Each structure stands twice: as C-alpha cells, then as structure tokens.
Image (spheres, grey):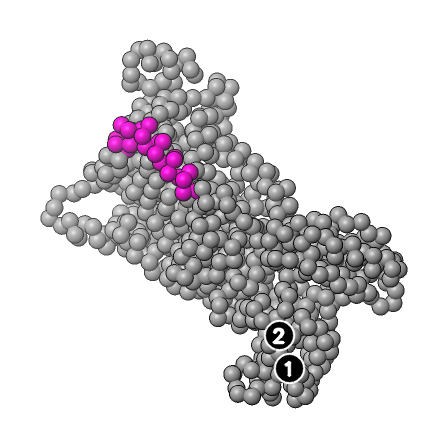
Amino acid sequence: MAEVKKSAPGGGTGGGWTRFVTARPRLTLLVALVLTALAVLAGGGVADRMGSGGWEDPAAESTYATEALAREFPGSQPNLLLLVDTDAAGKAGAAAVDDPAVVAEARKLAERLDAEPGVDGVGSYWSTGSPALRSEDGRQAVIAARIAGEEKDAAAILDRIAPEYRGTHGPVEVTLGGGLAVRHEMQVIIQEDLLRAELIALPLTLVLLVMVFGSAVAALLPLGVGIVAILGTNAVLRGITEFTDVSVFAQNLTTALGLGLAIDYALFVVRRYREELAAGADTYTAVRTTLRTAGRTVLFSALTVAVSLSAMLVFPQYFLRSFAYAGIAVVVLAALAALTLLPAALVLLGDRVNALDLRRLLRRGRPPREDTDGSGWARVADLVMRRAPVFAVATAAGLVLLGLPFLGVKFGTADDRQLPVTATSRVVQDQLRDGFPGNPGGGLTVLAEGEATPAQYEAFRARISTIEGVGRADGPVTAGGGAGQAYFTVVPEGETVGPGAQRVVSELRAAPAPFETSVTGQAAVLVDSKDALAERLPWAAAIVVLATLLLVFLLTGSVIVPLQAVLLNALSLTAMFGAVVWVFQEGHLAGLLGFTSTGDIETTLPVLMFCVAFGLSMDYGVFLLSRVKEEYDATGDHEHSVRFGLRRTGGLITAAAVILAVVMVAIGTSRVTNTKMLGLGVALAVLMDAMVVRSLLVPSVMKLTGRFTWWAPKPLRRFHDRFGVSESDAPAPAAPPAGTEADRKEYSSAL
C-alpha cells in the first residue's frame, strides 16, 4: 500500500468531521461492511411483505363502503374470479356452460372453493343464473368469491389454492382473475422486472463510470456507495412494513435513486478530490478540502431532494407515501455513505484512486490535457451569455411547447391493463370485457344503512334509475336478520371511469334517501382519489416551494437565485408531463414500448413524477449553483463565476444525468405500465434538465439578471451571514470588482 501523507487531518471548517471519518479508515469500512451484511439479512424478502395497491384514500366514502360491503355482503365485492371455459382449447363440439357435465363440474368447483379457509361469498352463474356471469356466446361463465383479510394474507391464501383450481377439470379449463389475482401477478412481475433492470443497469453504469473517470478504481467507488444505499433502504422498508402498508412499486425508486443519487454524490466527491490532488494537495488536505466544499454541497443536495420527496407524505394514499419512505431513506443513506465511506476509502487509496487510468494510457507520450478540462463547457457558457436573450426565450418557449399536451390530461384508475397482454389475470379481465354482457367490475354499488321498508327501497331504486347516465339500477340485496343494511347495483352508461360515470357518482351521493347511503366502485374511487389529491396538493406544493426557496437562499444568500431555481426547475419538467400524455394517454409509441393505452393517466402518477423529478433537478441545480457561488465569493466577478461553474460542473452534471437516465430507462423496461411511465418519464426529465436547462437556460437567465442575481435585502443578508452555508469560507464580496464606478455605485445602492 502506498504511503499516505498525513498533513494534519483536522483544522479548518470540516476538520472535525474529517478526523471522525478518516482517523481509522479501515475500521470505518469494516463497520460499514458489517452493517451492510446485516441490512442484507434484515431486508431479505421485503417485497413479499409489500402491497401492490394503495391508490385509494383510506378515509374516503368509497373505501368505507367497500369495506362495509366486504364485511356484510362478501358476494358483492368479489376479488377472485374463476373463468370457466368450455372451449379453451378450441376443441370441436365443446360443451356450452349449460351442458349437464359442465354444470356438475362447475358446481363441484364452487363447493370446493366455498369450503376453503379464508374464502367466502362464493357465487356463480350456475347458482344464481345471473346473465352477467355468462358470456354472450355461452362458452364461458364465472365463479366469483372473496378472499378476506389484509392484502398480504389474502395473497398467501391465493398462492395456496391457485394450483388446485387453475388448469383442466374434466370438460372445462379454469383460469384465475379478479382484483386480487391482478394485484398479485403485478407484484410478481414487478419483482422480476426489477431484478432484470438491476442486471441491465449495474454493468452499464460501471462502463459509463469508467468512461467518466477514466479509472477503473475511481469508477468502482460510486457503484459501491449505490449498492450500500440500496441494501440499506431495503432494510429500512422491511422495518416500515411492520407498522404500515408499503407499495411494491417503491422498490423501483429505491434502485433508481440508490444508484443514481449515490453515483451523483460520489462523482462530485471523487471529482473534487482528484482536482485537489492534481493541484498538489496531499491526501488528508485533499480529503479535508473535499468534505468542506463538495461534502457540504452533497449534504445540501440530499436535503433538497429529501424535502421534495417528503411532500408525498401529506397525501393519504399509501402508494404515494411509500415512495416518500423509500426516497427519503435512500437519499439519506446515499449521502451518508458518500460522506463517510467514501472519504475513508480515499484516505486508504491516496493518489491510487487514479489507478488503471485508461485516459493516461491512451495519452501516453502526449502532453497532459488536465488544464483544458471543461474548456468546451466554457465555450458553451460564452456563447449562451453572448446571446442570452435569444437562448432564454427560445429555450423557455420550446419547453412550454413540449408541455402543451398535458393540458389535455385525463385521470383514471389503475387496472389490469397495467399488465402485459399475456398475463393470465389480464387475459381473464380482457375476456370479461369483450365477451360478457354489461361491464363486469365497472358498475357502482350503493350501500344503504338504516331501517327501511320494501316500498322505500323500491322508491329509491326507481329514483336513481332515472339519473342521467344510469343504464340500469338493480336491487336491493338485503342482509339477513333485519340488520338494516342493503345494497343497490348501478351500471353507468359509457366508459367505466369516464366523465359520465363520475357525474353519476356525484348524483348518487346527492340523491335523497330515507337511510344513509355511500357509493363505491371504480368511478367512485377515482372521484375520491382526485378530491383527496386536490385537497392536499396545495400543501405538498407549498412544502416543496418554500423549502426550496429557504434551502437555496441558505446556499447562495440571494433572493433572486431561489426564485430562479423554482421557476426553472418547474419549467424543466414540462417535457416530461407533455410526453406522458402524448405517449401513455394518447397511445403514441404504444406498440414500440409494449403497453396498452387506457386513454387516461393514473391519478397519483403526475404527483409522484413531479416530486421525484423536481428533487433530482434541484440536485443538479445545487451542484451548479454551489460552484458558481464558490467562485463568486472568491472573485466577485459574476459572469466569470457563471462560466467557471458551468466549466467545472457541466460535464459532471451531464455524466450524472446520463447515468441516472440509464438506470431509469432500465426501470422503464418494466412490463407494468405505471413503472414504465415513471422510469421513462423521469429519465426524460433528468436529461432535459441537465442538457437544456442547466446548460442553456440557467446561464442565459443569470446573464440577464447580472449582478442583481446575488441581491438580498440587508436583514436577509445578515440572516444568511449567520445561518447560511457555502462551499467557500470566504464572505461574498459586497460588490463586483469589475465594471465602471457608476456600475459599482448602482450595485451598492441596490444592496
């Protein structure tokens, strides 16, 4: 091992932390290895404890009605369907569902299912004669049942009984569908897709890191930080599942952010460390300077990303809350690993961090090029700032145009069409939609609670059947024993969750009745979900915006820069939202990307994508602004500082964005549409932010705002002097040294 030069590891800002993480680097890494091994054990099987739902508001009327109906009328809320097919193999002369042999076999299956522990509410076409349970061609019919209990417990029962019912039974072929089967198959597919995404992303990421650093040793460091963050987050999520529901979708965010942010932070730290070594610093001085400068930025960046993700905690749907749990955990662990394990590793490596430097091997015999590193980005900055009005207007206008399709967004609910067309439960639901009368699963159910006479029930049924948009109203079905509970089934005209069905929900809830009523069904769940999101969205937006304004002010000491950051970050997301509607709602590229367009977007997805993409945009924004501010504090030259910041971080931000986009695209190869939308949408947002907003829009806007970019009123300036942070320990100059005397007087008066 090369001898490590030990200039005093302490001293100066960051000295205490430097001493803490580098005093015993081998012990630090050993402890990290032990903790990671424990995390592997603790997080094992976490996906099996997660749910695949969570889009509903638990306090909504529709949720209450669903739970009450499942408790009092299990047959009204089936979550398991056995599709009995008499012609599954296309055999000539196959019997219809009313053939005596088919009837006998179907009744035998229903009796067996009814005797299964945990299964109740079993009904079928052969027991009820309901035409809704028989296909129009008479070749298929349905046995419906409900598996009670929490989602994980119900899934375990399904796993146990499915092999006994799936397949050939005498003259019929049985396949399993229903909401529980759809969610369970979705969970299995997500786990399989996540493993495939990791197998794609990890080797590609390593190749890209080697290309960025030129050194195989340096490239392995960020990858190691990412793996530690992912494994640690899985352990955290495993613990959270003991107290609340967590969506299996959150594991995709764990992998994406675990790799992406860990690589971002490690890139920033390692790049700064190598710069300090190249400038002649010894190992400890380089580590100390790196932690004092890049380390502060990493900590600050992690805080901004965590705040953006924490906004999802205000929403009641556990689907969104799960992403907050996973995101906050992985951000904190990635930053902690980058600021603890990475410095310890750098102390042990010393200048051998450049070992296996492929670039030096390729440049052997040629003059060194380190002094020209980033010159291309400096030229970009010069060009952009010379034509600042043109670049600012053209870039902003282009981003707005790309976002215009989002004005036509339509919101819907997630259903079986999220799955690939070959998924068994999806096939069953497709056959129900195409071959059965009415709209199976698309009706509304009105729960009636309170004593009522048959005449009152009939009067209510007649009243709701006249509501515009109602195709048919059936019922009531009453509870035995005079419990004062009943339900009505309402079939809306048109699309299951379309505007007409949503209007019917509102009319049903407003309809007068001599008893308490509550409405559930897919359209009712959508209405309640939209209301819950609309109610909490201002709070989430306020958390993101106000926290961003405060944190960027603490970083820069300016009131202009935080406003720019919020506006430009929001603008960087327009392309993502426009593409989501154009591709996933309207169905363009559906064949190429392999998904089924439902004509709408699941309600929670835009909120999730905004929080994730906004946080990542702030991540890159902090990297750029911190370096600009550091140079401005040292020189007071605004334009030079912008040029210097882009020169030093442009390549880094672009490399980090490309690597994160590769990870997100790997996630986007999922066969589940929501996961595909999240991965590809965020990948687009990250690339647009790094390559367009940070490269063109930010420099042009900062050029236009000039010296006033750094303005703040005196009370806020004093506040920043006391509580603010910076990559530089030098105070910001009161006025830039360049310019005329009149310019300096104008600037001083503005301050």
Which residue: 71% across, 81% down?
A: 111
Q: Secondary structure at mark 1?
A: loop
Which residue: 61% across, 47% down?
A: 530
Marks 1 and 2 close (CB-CB < 8 Å) = yes
Mark number displayed over residue 97: 1
Compared across the picture, whether 261 is left or right of 165 comes to left
Q: Where residue 191 sits in the image (x, y, percent)?
A: 49, 65
Q: Where residue 254 sits in the image (x, y, percent)?
A: 48, 55
Residue 500 in view here:
yes
Please tell me in which quadrant of the rendered image residue 433 appears: bottom right
Q: Where residue 388 sits in the image (x, y, percent)?
A: 31, 28
Which residue: 38% across, 51% down?
A: 661
Q: Which residues are magenta?
A: 381-403
Quadrant of the drawing holding the N terminus: bottom left
Is disc 2 surrounded by few (<14), some (14 to 19) or many (20+) residues within 10 Å? Answer: many
Quadrant of the drawing holding the C terminus: top left
